[in-house]
Image (cartoon, helix red, strand yellow):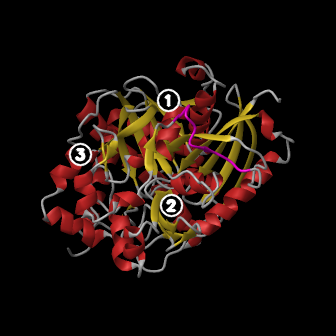
Amino acid sequence: MSEKKYVVTIDQGTTGTRCMIFSKDGKVISSAYEEHQQLYPKPGWVEHDPLEIWEKTKRVIKSALLPKEIKPGEIAGIGITNQRETTIIWDPHTSKPLYNALVWQDTRTREICQAMTDKGLEKVVRDKTGLVINTYFSGPKIKWLLENVPGVKEKAKGGDAIFGNIDTWIIWNLTGGPDGGAHITDYTNASRTMLMNLKTLDWDDELLNEMNIPRGMIPDIRPSSDKNIYGYTKKEGPFGAVIPVCGDLGDQQGALFGQTCFEIGETKNTYGTGCFLVQNTGTTPVKSKSGLLTTVAYGLEEGKATYALEGSIAITGAAIQWLRDNLGLIKSASETEKIAQSVEDAGGIYFVPAFSGLFAPYWDMYARGVIVGLTRFITKEHIVRATLESICYQTKDVVNALYADSGIKLTALKVDGGASKNNFLMQLQSDILGVTCMRPPVEETSALGSAYCAGLATGLWDNLDELKKNWRIDKKFEPEWDEQKREQGYKGWRKAVERTRDWLDR
């Protein structure tokens, strides 16, 4: 029998799927990545093809295993981390999706959310789930699919249609699909559906009934690291062997766990398609009064959880993609660092990329993006710089709300995600916040966090203290701006945000 040396993570994100293999010291042994299509059938609609995602998942697994000749018997376990809230309904007998996945950015459920708000359900939703009524979350997306895709409602009532976020879809297929697949999710992903009660850590019947969602179509909720094992891969599957699947974390909670933010007040920000700033608040949920979300950070035992406050920002890295794909101002995201440094500042403009409305701390699904302060002086270089500044200013909005809620003054921020490689952006973030930003060597901390959960479940690591020893700093960024410059820049940002508010008619 081979010695257990590695943990595998499948990191299924908004733009692509990655398979990463980690050693016991938290180092990356192998990695493979493939993008998938972004589908925009109507304004505000964002979809993915679940079958394409599963095909890409199988491909990256094989690609990651091949170069290092890693034997399946050396793998202790498999963890999943995923784009949260993205919603799929499929036939459990065939594993055939009954519609494309509705992505977390999708805003087609605006009328459903408005109807719930008009009914006076905001307080109920906030008190039970820690969330706000918004198009972001899975519950309204399930309701839309049940009401708008022919035959889905009838199938769901008859047990012929089941729901899952992306983690559930991947675990289902990994563990056999129609042939005994595990239909499960974990506390972190369940907490993003607008259907889980934070106190009971179970599905809430009142909210299920409110959205007319049959309880039989939703997955069982399990710990994020589960010694009882969710299920096992099949020999005929992409791993070619029987391996336990036993770790599951939504991507932002995965990053918090991977950054070893196990103490109250420890905070991380992930710079990806969106930005997600999460602070550990301990074993008691902290109710936000400042536009943040109360969510589960992770759960390592049945019926127990550590909680967090989260500021979710919809469009950050996606704004850079927009510069590249829609406007053609850049050829690659890596160019933005040099381009932004070629000008002294943004020339007096601000770019608020509210393409999907504003998320935390404003929660305005009627807002839309603006560039303000334009003059003939402005060049593409200024627009690129303003795009990077928008990432940092949106983060400052969230940090201010976090302080108002928790009373914990941020002194350091752990940063990760693809855009954290941009040194200019990270220095700008430190300057705008006025705090130290610390970047670890492994930027894919979501994957590392999920690997840790799988390794804890199978005994590769014994406890959280052992994981903390793996955390290291690659680069530290200290603030250089004075307070006057910081305040002046932020004042302009707040004015720009106001120009985006309530752009669409209600």
Nearer the viewer's eye, disc 3 or disc 2? 3
Question: Which residues are drawn in magenta?
Answer: 225-234
Query: Quarter of the image holding residue 488?
Result: top left
Q: Amino acid at mark 1?
A: Glu
Secondary structure beneath label 1 = loop
To which residue does mark 2 refer? Answer: 318
Q: For the residue marked with disc 2, what is the amino acid?
A: Ala
The disc, 2 or 1, on the residue closer to the chain's N-terminal end is: 2
Q: Is residue 104 visible?
A: yes
Please state which of residues 375 and 495 is positioned toward the viewer in this rendering: 495
Q: Is residue 306 magenta?
A: no
Give x and y (percent) for residue 295: 35, 41
| Residue nearest the viewer, comparing 248 with 122 | 248
Real-space Cα distance between discs 1 and 3? 39 Å
x then y, percent, for residue 346? 45, 56
How far apart marks 2 and 1 lie (CA) works out to 26 Å
Q: Secondary structure at mark 2?
A: helix
Element under disc 3: helix
Q: Nearer the viewer, mark 1 or mark 3?
A: 3
